[in-house]
Image (tube, helix red, strand yellow):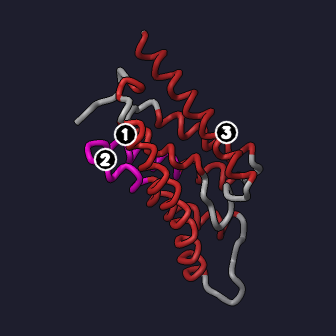
Amino acid sequence: MKMKITTLVQAAMIAALYVVLTFVANAFGLANYAVQVRFSEALTVLPYFTPAAIPGLFIGCLLSNILTGCILPDIIFGSLATLIGALGTYALRKWKWFAPITPILANVLIVPLVLIYGYGFLIEGTSYVYCYGYYALTVGAGEIISCGVLGMILLFTLEKYPKLFKPNYQTE
């Protein structure tokens, strides 16, 4: 019973932190659209430490997308991208340096489609393929900053405090 409560509390805290960090990024105009540097995406490395982060990240992203006024396809598919990334991070937890890879890839593959087909962000006089490539680069750059750089800084910092995620944390 204690493990379930710990997992639930961790997931809720991660979700709340994700929302708060998204609002901070949103205040600077960095949370949505073509160029996104969501500070909250750094949290996608947390499944490396605990499976509780998976629902926490998904719910946090879902709430963030709703509360920042995203359209329905972004709410659904943007949140699913974060869920896929979190599941991938957990699956690859044996390899520390792979922690940010799946969140980056999930967002690079999914978010450009949301921008093009959901928001109708097309570059005049260009094809859908060109637009997809352009948005994959812009979203990818933001994700590399958020997940790759900030996320790995967070991961290395949290590794110094292994008891923080007990009983879920597994050192390997």
* Quarter assignment of residue 67: top right
Q: At label 2, which amino acid type do we have?
A: Lys
The residue to which callout 3 is attached is 20
Residue 95 position within the rendered picture, expressed as x and y whole percent measured from the top left: 27, 48
Extreme residue in the top direction: 1
Callout 2 touching callout 1 (CB < 8 Å): yes
The residue to which callout 2 is attached is 96
Q: Residue 54 colored magenta?
A: no
Left or right of 75? Residue 69 is right
* Label 3 Cα crowd, 10 Å radius (few <14 / some 14-19 / many 20+): some
Instruction: Name the residue at 29% across, 30% down.
Output: 170
In the rendered structure, which segment of residues is drawn in magenta? 81-102
Decide: is 117 above or below 41.
Answer: below
Q: At label 1, which amino acid type do we have?
A: Tyr
Q: Quadrant of the C terminus?
A: top left
Decide: is 118 above or below 155.
Answer: below
Q: Earlier in the sequence, mark 3 or mark 1?
A: 3
**Mark 2 residue element:** helix
Instruction: Name the residue at 72% across, 52% down.
Output: 26
The residue to which callout 1 is attached is 48
**Mark 3 residue element:** helix
Residue 45 position within the rendered picture, expressed as x and y whole percent measured from the top left: 43, 44
CA–CA distance in space, label 3 to label 1: 21 Å
Decide: is 124 above or below 142.
Answer: below
Q: How many marks?
A: 3
Q: At label 3, which amino acid type do we have?
A: Val
* Label 2 Cα crowd, 10 Å radius (few <14 / some 14-19 / many 20+): some
Res 98 label: none
